[in-house]
Amino acid sequence: MLPFLNRTEEKVLISNALQKAEGQLIVVYGRRRCGKSRLLRELAGDRMLYFPADQREATLQRAALAGMLDTKLPGFSDVHYPDWEALFTNLHYRTASADAPIVLCIDEFPYLVGADAALPSIIQGFIDKFPARKVHLILAGSAQHMMGGLALDPTAPLYGRAREVLRIRPLAPYWLQEAVEGLSGAAVVEEYAVWGGVPRYWELRADFPDLASAIKSLVFSPFGILYEEPTRLFQDETRSATQLFSILSLIAGGCHRLSEIAARLEKPATQLSRPLALLQDLQYVSRDIPFGESEKTSKRGFYKIADPFLNFYFQVVVPYRSALESGQGEQIWRLTEPLRIRMLADIWERICRQALPKLLGDMLILPPQRWWQKDTGTELDMATTAYDRKTLVVGEVKWSDTPDVPRISAKLDRILTQPAFQGYPQVIRVLFSKSAVTAPGFDLCFSAEDVVSSLK
């Protein structure tokens, strides 16, 4: 089993909430396989009761939960519970005299809501009616949109009731070195470009001697455990995965603008606002805006698949599914090598933008953005400013051990003459490369080792 990685802040927040003398509500949600259940089990003590919900009818789920509560509250399941209100009411009275609250963790909570849509309102009533209750309630789930709305939507019954609402996100690249032994900084980037920050994917990868064999077995094989992974992820969020699957396929195929996606789907752009917003909320898709333009007003938004695994899957697997189904994984591996190299360079660029704020130390900067000029095709990998708007930071990113530094520096000189980069008293020029290099014309230079080490 993979060692438990990071999540220090999340553990502290949950542990502090569980120290309270009166019952607290904690909501934990995030993408499947990111370690929510593992986190909760790591926190489990003698007081915690962990109940994994499933897709049975509500009557059967209540009976199962009551049976589990028997382990702490003998005889709890001897009572028939016609509804959830009866169960939670009895739970309160059975625990009211306890010295310390018990901890009830309900994992995959959306399954229970699917069987009884009134459950969030019933829990609201339980919380409001018994403010001095002796039950800490942890609700966890992989349906990110539903779980986030459960506690953060002002119209939701549980809005304002949770002490902590924690979104468990994918881990940063650094932690891959803890999951797969012997990886250099450059190797971490190569692995992260496929698996992203999902711990379960890392655990599966660790069973193979190298990246290539892991991809061929886990992703390219129709029998591989990750071969249908996107469909499973989408089914957590929507009844039909067709529209989300189609949008991601088009983005992977080169349709990066809303008008292009709408044209290919033969739908009005207005009909795509909701699914694109969902994909962005899930952090599966991002919308890049050129440096210097407002996200709200820019008409040059550029959609990209933000999640590394989904990016890999929709570019390398989806177009070749028929060949993979017929057992031609080895041929597809060779055929897609140039594509995989381009994808690696793109993910490396994104990782560098993510690392820049940490690498600059005490300097506070706005989130780095790309910049591009449509008429000339000129691009800059990253640009940002300090919060005081007096310092401009620009960077170029190369996945190379020996980048052509003079050529890159000259290109940067030309770009800095553009209006978007004028008026800054100080300009900091940064070069990112696969290996450490001497870079005349640049103020800072970072290697893959530097970048990965910064992303903890």
Image (cartoon, rainbow, N blue to C red):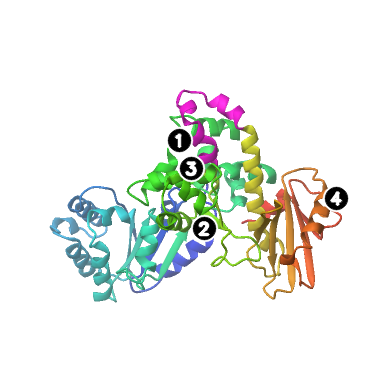
Secondary element at tag 4:
helix
Query: Gap in Å between the C-alphas at discs 3 and 4?
Result: 38 Å
Is 263 placed above or below 91 here? above
What label sits on residue 249 in the rendered view?
A: 3
| Cβ atoms under marks 2 and 4 closer than 8 Å | no
420 or 81: nearer the viewer = 420
Query: Gap in Å between the C-alphas at discs 2 and 4?
Result: 42 Å
Instruction: Report x, y in % for residue 425.
Output: 79, 73
Identity of the amino acid at label 1?
Tyr
What residue is drawn where x is 12% and y is 57%? Answer: 80
Q: Neighbour class for label 1 at 10 Å: few (<14), some, many (≥20)? A: some
Is 137 placed above or below 200 here? below
Secondary element at tag 2:
loop
Instruction: Report x, y in % for residue 269.
Output: 44, 55
Query: Gap in Å between the C-alphas at discs 1 and 4?
Result: 44 Å
What label sits on residue 227 in the rendered view?
A: 1
Identity of the amino acid at label 2?
Arg
What label sits on residue 7 in the rendered view?
A: 2
Please give the range of residues in magenta: 312-336
